[in-house]
Amino acid sequence: MNDNSLNKSDAKNFNNPEISVVCPLFNEVGNVKKLHKKILKSLRSLDKSFEIIFVNDGSFDGTKEVCEKLRPLKLINFRKNFGQTAAIDCGFKEAKGEIIITLDGDLQNDPSDFSKLLEKIYQGYDVVSGWRKNRKDKFSKKFISKGAEILRKFFINDQIHDSGCTLKAYKKECFYDLDLYGEMHRFIPAILKIHGFTVTEVKVRHQPRKSGKTKYGWKRTIKGFLDLVSVWFWKKYSNRPLHLFGGLGSLLTMVGFGILIFLAVLRIFYHIPLSDKIWPLISIFLILAGLQLFISGLLADIAVKSYYKNNKKHYSIKHIQINS
């Protein structure tokens, strides 16, 4: 039987899956057909019921048209490009399986590694992250990833070697109360670990990209760093934010008052004129900055979290097609 042909077992399994495979796609027309074939072959070898979900993140190179002909497949089409995190978040919410596996659409992740991830899941772990120990990327990409790894260890220390690897397996329960945005898909294991889920990793294969262009650039690096700081904040201060904002605000305020007192002593006891000095303005600025940091930073972050917790999606689905 052809690996990419549909059979009755696939159709039955697709309606009541144990495993959901979620794959975000953006302009991967040269890879998507081969990827579907490899995923299907790997899932059939597991002897488990499954579904395959491709999230087309606003592709304009023909990816959508190729996907529409693939079976079995649940195809979710975004109205425009909302980013990999949004596509993964959408896939999580649409998945029906008790175990969710994610991977990239560039054929650099090997679907034959699914069994390694599932072995750890069946041992009792909630999250299994792939570790591309022997990466097949360009030096520049490896260099940036190494820098990101150092920063990640400094800020959150999730004990994962390769958080940027999309090839991961999760229990469905991990996402009952979790919304992703920004570039947060890189930090899912860290976020789930903060919530008490058990996390481990396994070494997986990594292939060089043979078709299409990488979607990673300096803009995503900056966004990733900002989201890293956000994860760090919620890990350390989510239940005591005033320890951070209040501490910094109080420090600035104390410095400002200290300068004011010193200036008052100079003026009253030493009769030093201050009208031509900038220090009075600096002290007032520090006091006001401390008070504003104390209040506005905390309110802004809470407001953003409240927005996403109210289930206001940051992406728009145009159409869902199910080929069973």
Image (cartoon, helix red, strand yellow):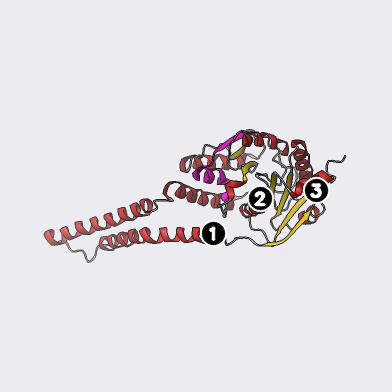
The residue where tag 2 is placed is 215
Q: Reply above or below: 134 against 314.
A: above
Q: Position of residue 187 (x, y in %)?
A: 55, 46
Which mark lies nearer to you, 3 or 2?
3
Give the distance between the C-alpha atoms of the residues marked 1 and 2, in whole angstroms: 25 Å
Direction from residue 135 to residue 287 in the image, left or right: left
Q: Earlier in the sequence, mark 1 or mark 3?
A: 3
Tell me what residue is drawn at x 22 percent, y 59 percent: 260
Disc 2 element: loop
Residue 273, given in percent of the width and then of the height, sits at: 18, 64
Q: Secondary structure at mark 3?
A: helix
Q: Disc 3 designates what residue?
A: 11
The answer to whether the residue labelled 3 contacts the one labelled 2, judged by CB atoms less than 8 Å apart, is no
Nearest to the observer: residue 192 or residue 216? 192
> Crowdedness of circle 3 by 10 Å Cα count: few (<14), some, many (20+)?
some
The label number, if any, that marks residue 308 in the structure image = 1
Q: Are marks 1 and 2 in contact (CB under 8 Å)?
A: no
Q: Secondary structure at mark 1?
A: helix
Amino acid at pointer 3 = Ala
> Which badge, 1 or 2, comes first in the chain's sequence?
2
Residue segment shown in magenta? 184-205
Residue at image position (31%, 55%) is 250
| In the depicted structure, whether residue 145 falls above or below residue 56 | above
Disc ID at residue 1: none
The amino acid beneath tag 2 is Lys
Q: Is residue 204 magenta?
A: yes
Q: Where in the figure is residue 272, as x and y percent of width and height?
A: 16, 61
Can you tell which of label 1 and label 2 is closer to the viewer? 1
